[in-house]
Structure formats: C-alpha cells, structure tokens
Amino acid sequence: MKKLLSIITFQLLLVFTVPAFAANYTVDSVHSNIGFSVRHLVISNVKWSFTDVYGSFTFDEKKVALKDANLTIKAKSISTNEPKRDGHLRSPEFLNTDKYPTLTFKMKKSGSLGGKKMWVTGDLTIAGVTREIRLEGEYIGAAKDPWGNFRAGFTAEGKINRFDYGLKWNKAIETGGMVVGKEVRLIIEVEGIRKK
C-alpha cells in the first residue's frame, strides 16, 4: 500500500511540475504595426497605421495556440502621411480622439486553421462602440535577439464596416459612389517580447 501511495504521489508531482508551454509576452510597439486600408473615390485604397500600440498576449508555441491577447492603440497616433487628412480622422467626424483616446481589442476565442495559421475572435472598440470581429492570421516564428530577449511574431487580417462604429462621414462623387468606402480592412503585425 505504501509503495502504491509513493507511486501516485510521484506521478502527481510530475503532473504539477511539468513546465507550462504557454508564455506571456509584452507587445513591442517599435516592431508592431496596426494598419487599415479603405477604398478612396471607388478607384484606389488609402492606407494608414497607428504608431503607438501596446498590449500583451499569451502564446503556446508547442501547440501554436494563442491563449489570450489584448491591444490598446492611441487614437491620436494615426498616420496617413498627410497631416490634413490625419487631422480630419482625429476629428469628431471620425475617431473623435479627444473624447475617445484609445482603440482596444480584447480576444475572446481562438482556434487553429492548420499549421501555423489560426483565427481569433474578440471585441474591437472604436470611438466608444464595441463589436465582435474575427481575424485570421499566422504565427511567423520566434527568435532570440542579440540582447537575450525571446521574441515571437504574428500577422492577422480582418474586415469591419466603419458604419458599425458610427464613423459615417462621407461625400458623394459625380461619377457615382462615395469618397470613402464603408469596408475597412485591418492589417495587423505584432511582435512580442516574452516576459522573464
């Protein structure tokens, strides 16, 4: 009986001392980019990005599984390389950055699409309005930098209707259609540093 108890105790110790493969990461804003693309005048796409983004995620490299992810974006950091347009996007006609200084994404669920590809759903909040969205992306890989930091990188894309977030400013054009399209494509590239 004592021998049996010893074996059970040893097995339980093994279970509880096996290291977890999921690790916590901090988003490296210098090497991450949150971009958007929207149709302009029906004939081209205008792209912009946010230069100030921070957050965290939990990732299981062995299972290629994202366990948790949270992003916060400073709304005023929007950049289209056109100061006048940037000012308009920050105004109450669009992001209203004085009233709503951040955009946020909070992951709810995730799953595999095979290999290094995955999907996530989560709540995206823009200008005080929250909607659930789906993103599909890929785990690019992991590496140790020259300073001993372990890093992991991901890309993801998705689509939203800006009208769902109350961003309804527009103007009609003579040839038909509107100046700014409703559909906005999200292009996300995130690099994280594993917490020590």
Image: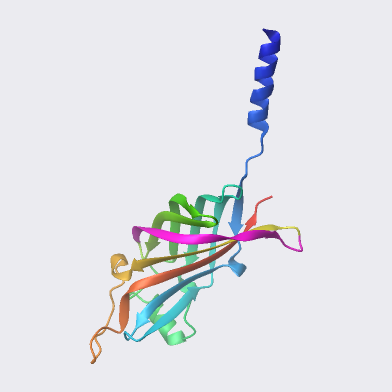
Using the rendered view, name the quadrant where residue 191 is placed: bottom right
Residue 138 part of the magenta segment:
yes
**Residue farthest to the bottom, as pictured:** 174
- Does the image show residue 68? yes
Q: Is residue 193 left or right of residue 38?
A: right
Q: Is residue 195 above or below residue 50?
A: above
Give residue 130's position: percent from left, percent from top: 35, 58
**Residue farthest to the top, as pictured:** 1
Q: Is residue 109 above or below residue 172?
A: above
Image point (51%, 50%), residue name: 68
Image point (69%, 50%), residue name: 196
Image point (42%, 82%), residue name: 46
Using the rendered view, name the quadrant where residue 1 is placed: top right
Prevalent SS, magenta region:
strand
What segment carries the magenta color? 129-147
Residue 171 part of the magenta segment:
no
